[in-house]
Image: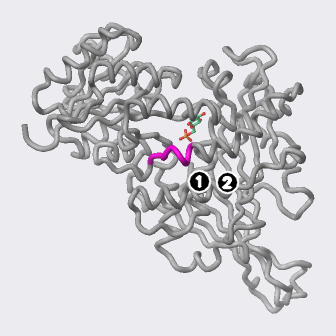
Amino acid sequence: CGGISHAYVIFGATGNLAATKLLPALYQLHCMGQMAEDVEILGCGRTPYTRDSWQEEVRKQFVEAGMAESPCLASFIQRLDYLSGSLKDAGFYQALGKWISNDGECANNVIFYLSVSPDLYVEVTEGLAAANLLDETHGWRRMVIEKPFGHNLESARALQHSLSDHLKEEQIYRIDHYVGKEAVQNLLVLRFANLILEPLWNRHHIDHIQITHAETLGVEGRANYYDKSGGAVRDMIQSHLLQVMALLAMEPPVSLQSESLRDEKVKVLQSIRPVDLEQLATHAIRGQYAAGEISGQAVPGYLQEEGVAPGSHTESYAAMKLYIDNWRWKGVPFYLRTGKRLKERRSMVAVRFRRPPMQLFHGSGISQPHPNWLLIGIQPEDAVRMEVSAKVPGLEMRTRQIVMDASVGHPGERKAEAYEELLLDVIKGDRSLFLRYDEVKAAWNVVDPVMQRWGEDEQLPLQYPAGGWGPKAAEKIFEGSDRAWRHSL
Ligand code: BG6
């Protein structure tokens, strides 16, 4: 067989993540010519598909999702195979071993993608190890796991302990799909491929930074997972938003090699000051959506969603104020917030600069100079905007804010999906965009005390109507300063 040969083995292949993200991303890589000829994709699940019926099922899913029948789709489908069985059954791993070796000398490099409940990570790893499928004598074996990595600091440690009994750190790919988004990677480029931002990128010039991930969707049939193991802090802040914060705040890395990049990110995470639990109401705010309207459609409240426990305290909204105790950022607040069933779907970073030291333009009708803002859209728009003051045309010396605006992509350019980039990186063995265990641990360290304190609180999270911007009290996080949430670019 020519070239590197490898197989993707997807556990949980009949689940939602595989259908909506993994298989479409592999399909795109296939069509872009990024997949070697002899790569096979093995779906594993309990549903008893055969190779043929699985291929037909995936083809149907793709067409239903709006993809056109094409030679590319037809040739992609030919790469698919299926193995049914229970992940709890030793016989399943034996059969998997047989499939891998039956594939001949070529299928020696294998990616095991665990698109299953995190409770099963250890069991699957042990099953694979017992069948000797993690041994790298005849090619590499890599395991991809999805967040959450544990549900708190202690369980993250226990998970790491169990995984490292069978896998070397280099074999573990902890995926945080947010880091694979084009606009999130662009944060590195904006900061380190330009010179104009870096001299200003510190406590002397920046007043504060906001990181927002707002969704209009609710729990969308994931209540079973979200209500027990999620909540806005675990589901979004511990992973995605702290990663964005680390990329915004880190020092220039020595290189873009995975270890250099992750060394710098982890220093930021380790420098985050513990949240002040005595002042929790102004440092961390949690909310839960009540019934309301999204784009004119009535939607139920969180507690009425199917699968949510009666009286559940799980938060669907969280906002946190964090400080990084290092030379660059001491005293600069980072405000992170995320919520479901909010007014708009929008993820963005808003950097507010300090005000100029004095107001020269007394005739301008404003008592204070406007601060500059740098706004970076992550989704839906991938845009960079800068708000600056300029003279209003006319005889008077009056000023107003104008916007310097640029969309990142050019018309007609296709944005790569996060999973395309990340799945390709796993084949290449590039771990830069995957989380290292020390990052995960440092991130749990930040959120764990807050979650524990909330866990002891008998009050329900603050209720907010679906379709708004979250609980009113989330403004309290600014403590009466002249700061307020930016909801749009
Ligand atoms: C996932 C969370 O990791 O990220 C979801 O579990 C959330 O609750 C999603 O909706 C948001 O990511 P994206 O890429 O859909 O904006």
Q: What type is the residue that disc 2 sits on?
A: Ile
What percent of the width, then of the height, locates residue 65? 41, 28
Residue 314, above or below 90: below
- Front position among marks 1 and 2: 1
The disc label shown at residue 244, or none: 1
Q: Is residue 63 visible?
A: no
Ligand 1 resides in the quarter of the picture at top right
What percent of the width, then of the height, locates residue 331? 78, 66
Dot 1 or dot 2, earlier in sequence: 2
Give 432 or 360, whichever is nearer the viewer. Answer: 432
The region drawn magenta spans 434-440
The disc label shown at residue 429, or none: none
Residue at image location 40% in from the left, 21% down from the top? 124
Secondary structure category for the residue under label 2: strand
Q: How far separated are the C-alphas under marks 1 and 2?
A: 8 Å
Horizontally, residue 122 falls left or right of residue 376, namely: left
Q: Is mark 1 within 8 Å of ligand 1?
A: no
The disc label shown at residue 211, or none: 2
What percent of the width, then of the height, locates residue 8? 28, 31
Q: Is residue 437 magenta?
A: yes
Residue at image location 64% in from the left, 25% down from the top? 229
Secondary structure category for the residue under label 1: helix
Horizontally, residue 397 falls left or right of residue 99, namely: right
Q: Is residue 221 magenta?
A: no
Q: Find out whether the residues at labels 1 and 2 contact each other: C-beta distance under 8 Å.
A: yes
Categorize mark 2 by other alpha carbons within 10 Å: few (<14), some (14-19), many (20+).
many
Give 324 or 375, whichever is nearer the viewer. Answer: 324
Residue 484, above or below 175: below
